[in-house]
Image: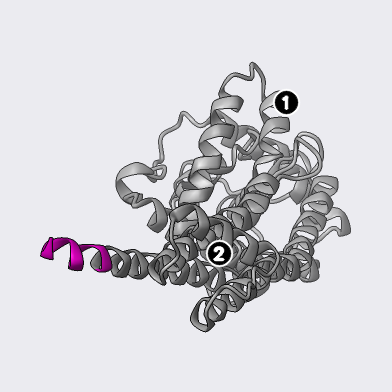
Amino acid sequence: MHAELWIHPALRLLAGAAGTVVVVTTLSAAVRSFVLPRNESVRLNNRIFAGIRWVFDLAAGRANNYARRDRIMAHYAPVALVALPIAWLALVSLGYTAIYWALGLDSWLKAYELSGSSLLTLGISKENDLLVNVFNYSEATIGLLLLTLLISYLPTLYQAFSRREVTVARLELRAGTPATSTHLIEWLNSSGSLTDDDAQWAEWEQWFVEIEESHTSLPILNFFRSPQPGRSWVMAAGLILDTANLLFSALDVPRTRQMELTFKAGCLSVNRVYRFFDVRAGVNAAAELPGPAPSTAPDHPEFDRALDELAGLGLPVCDERAAAWGHFQERRTRYAPALKYLAELTMSPETRSL
């Protein structure tokens, strides 16, 4: 009998503490996702996204071609983004249900009804005491705050997506169909000098800087697919980096400082986006994603074909092709593992590297 007198209040106190932890954790996840001006992996959001991704992976795995998989995966990011505040609201409601029961409501059902009405409207009742009504107001405020955060950040999200896709689309126009580094170099050489178009390289540097910032602070952006099925921001990043790498390794032309800055910005950008997801998943980069080892082996037909095409354009190709291949492979280890991981993560379409 004496045990019952303290066990019941202790259970209510424990439920109130657990509910408070759930509410605070959810609110913290929302603030870190949309207000904190830096990239931070939020475990709660990751689990929500991972659960939705599992469903989409299951559906995409049943598709028998890339076009159908692309159509399915195009819905993943929007659905996940809409599901995020729904999950937040559900967790807040669950947390406040425990708090209201801890404050003395007769049953869990009444606590849940009060929590739901407080979250979605404002469940004030004259029957409630002052302390319960204080929590009513706080829950209503949090519910409004969570929805406002998402709605206010949707324009920011889509502006970043639009800026990314403008560069991807313009790159496709310049790199030909299929898009290759040799086609892009041919376009860059349209003026007769590869070193005269620093403005274009500066634009690509700016694009890489924006990708690094937006795709780590708003990670759901990585999964928004291009409007056209054959396009991908990962594919575009690889094309620019391979083009710069080919220029540095295989052509006997002066490299400008802007070209080098763009290549460096690209390597940093794709690797920092990769590490963001690598840290989240707990993957060992070196163990899981080995890059291509530097080699001077003669069996590299695609590289030779690319150099033959460049020579056909009248460009000064290096005589020592084996050495050029070794330099190309060495530089490619700086970004190829990250691109490989991101292409698999986002189900990017396949593309030629040269």
Q: In the figure, residue 15 lies in which quadrant?
A: bottom left
User: Where residue 63 sits in the image (x, y, percent)?
Assistant: 64, 20
- The answer to whether residue 243 is visible is no
* Residue beneath the point at 71% across and 24% down: 68
Q: Nearer the viewer, residue 161 or 251?
A: 161
Is residue 229 shown above or below 270? Answer: above
Quadrant housing the C terminus: top right
- The residue singled out by tag 1 in the image is 67
The numbered mark, 2 or 1, whose residue comes first in the sequence reads 1
Crowding around mark 1 (Cα neighbors within 10 Å: few <14, some 14 to 19, many 20+) is few
Left or right of 107 on screen, residue 257: right
Give amino acid for label 1: Ala
Q: Are marks 2 and 1 in contact (CB under 8 Å)?
A: no
- The answer to whether residue 175 is visible is yes
- The residue singled out by tag 2 in the image is 216
Magenta highlight on residue 8: yes
User: Where residue 128 sits in the image (x, y, percent)?
Assistant: 55, 74
User: Where residue 111 sits in the image (x, y, percent)?
Assistant: 50, 60
Magenta-drawn segment: 1-9
